[in-house]
Image (tube, rainbow, N blue to C red):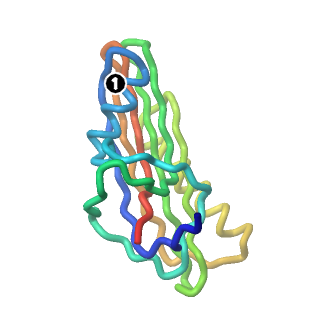
Amino acid sequence: MIVATPTRYFMACGCAEGVTELNAFDAALLCAGVGDTNLVRVSSILPPGCEEVTSIDLPPGALVPTAYASVTSAVPGEVITAAVAVALPEDEAHPGLIMEHHGHAPGEQVEEEARRMAAAGMEVRGKRIREIRSVAAEHVVVNTGAAFAGVILWN
């Protein structure tokens, strides 16, 4: 099966509690608005000219290419965060770069690391950065929690 190159993307994030870590992850996906799809994990390249949108009405059960970070914990009181950053090149004919990061740390720290990684990845490619965009989901675990952040790619 050949999949068309995505032309649109949006960033989504969410966090939640669940009876197990998998249930918490599922609930975090629902919180992020992508829980009724099948996320297909992809590596971190944003196709050239891909347009950012606020959201996409994804068909239930669809196979959805996604670069994402997630983290779960069953340690009450622990802070967990998932973040993604998108580095957009100055030259829109070149691809962008997505970096994902998660940690048992505050949101600001994890999100900043994702942004730093995106900048470093563009530097290695010799590409000038027009802008870096990012999102993060921070969660303080009550019993069993999860945090998710992703770049959702679609046509």
Amino acid at dot 1: Val
- The image shows residue 106 at horizontal and vertical percentages of 42, 34
Question: Is residue 12 positioned above or below 147 on the image?
Answer: below
- The image shows residue 65 at horizontal and vertical percentages of 49, 57
Secondary structure of the residue carrying tag 1 is strand
The residue at the point 42 percent across, 21 percent down is 21
- State which quadrant residue 98 falls in: bottom right
Q: Is residue 3 left or right of residue 80?
A: right
- State which quadrant residue 3 falls in: bottom right
Question: Is residue 144 positioned above or below 12 on the image?
Answer: above
Question: Is residue 78 positioned above or below 151 on the image?
Answer: above
Count of labels in the image: 1
The residue at the point 48 percent across, 31 percent down is 71
The residue at the point 46 percent across, 26 percent down is 72
The residue at the point 48 percent across, 52 percent down is 84
Q: Which residue carries the number 1 mark? A: 140
Q: Is residue 41 left or right of residue 137?
A: right
Q: Is residue 132 left or right of residue 11?
A: right
Residue sitting nearer the eye, 12 or 128: 12
